[in-house]
Image (tube, grey):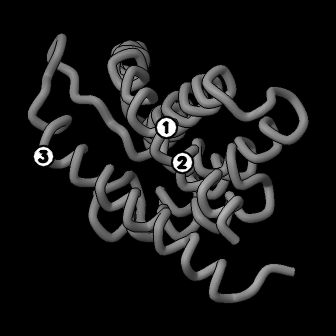
Amino acid sequence: MLPKSYLVFKWTVYALATLLLFGLQSLVLDQLHPFGLTPFLYPMLPAVAAMYEGSRRGPAFALALGVVCDLILSGPFEGFFTLVFTLIGIVSGVVAENAISPGFLCGLVVSGGALLGTAGMRILIHALSGGGYLALMAQIALGETLITLPAIVVVLPLYRVIHRRCASDY
């Protein structure tokens, strides 16, 4: 078992890196509107972290990140991001442990799945509440996923450095 100080240090560093990525979303990505769409970085974060941390620790990080996002973002219902991000963490951890070894390809797969899964849940909730324009919403979701995925070149190396440095230093 790892010392508590190691775990506190590791997750504090992850939290600071995530805060930096929140700043990237707020200060840069929210100002960009290619094709009239805005990149949405948040679902990528629990996916990549869970890819590196596995199906036990990854969902815990995803749960905490979901709670924070529920406090600062508006979703279709209260607790939306907590629920969806926890599911993303579980699936991403399982994929990385059993299907594709952690790296760029796995990061791309789990990030794409996280972005499409989050958008798909929004569309499903909209459809269940009697909303229309489902085809348009699906088109927007696909477009937002495609314009957000290039951010993997920032998120993946940042989380990889944290995962490797914390694992090798302690």
Q: According to the image, label 3 marks what residue?
A: 27
In the picture, measured across the screen, residue 108 lies left or right of residue 154, that is: right
Query: Relative to 64, does residue 8 appear above or below in the rendering?
Result: below
* Residue 35 picture quarter: top left
Q: Secondary structure at mark 2?
A: helix
Q: For the N terminus, which image quadrant?
A: bottom right
Q: Earlier in the sequence, mark 1 or mark 3?
A: 3
Structural crowding at the residue carrying mark 3, measured as other residues with C-alpha within 10 Å and reported as few (<14), some (14–19) or many (≥20): few
Tags 1 and 3 in contact by the CB under 8 Å rule? no
Residue 144 image position (x, y, % from top left)? 34, 23
Tags 2 and 1 in contact by the CB under 8 Å rule? yes
In the picture, measured across the screen, residue 15 lies left or right of residue 116, that is: left
Residue 106 image position (x, y, % from top left)? 68, 27
**Residue closer to the observer: 17 or 143:** 17
Q: Earlier in the sequence, mark 2 or mark 3?
A: 3
Q: Given the image, on which type of amino acid does mark 2 rest? A: Val
Q: According to the image, label 2 marks what residue?
A: 161
Tags 2 and 3 in contact by the CB under 8 Å rule? no
Could you give the CA–CA distance between mark 2 and mark 3, rounded to whole angstroms? 23 Å
In the picture, measured across the screen, residue 61 lies left or right of residue 145, that is: right
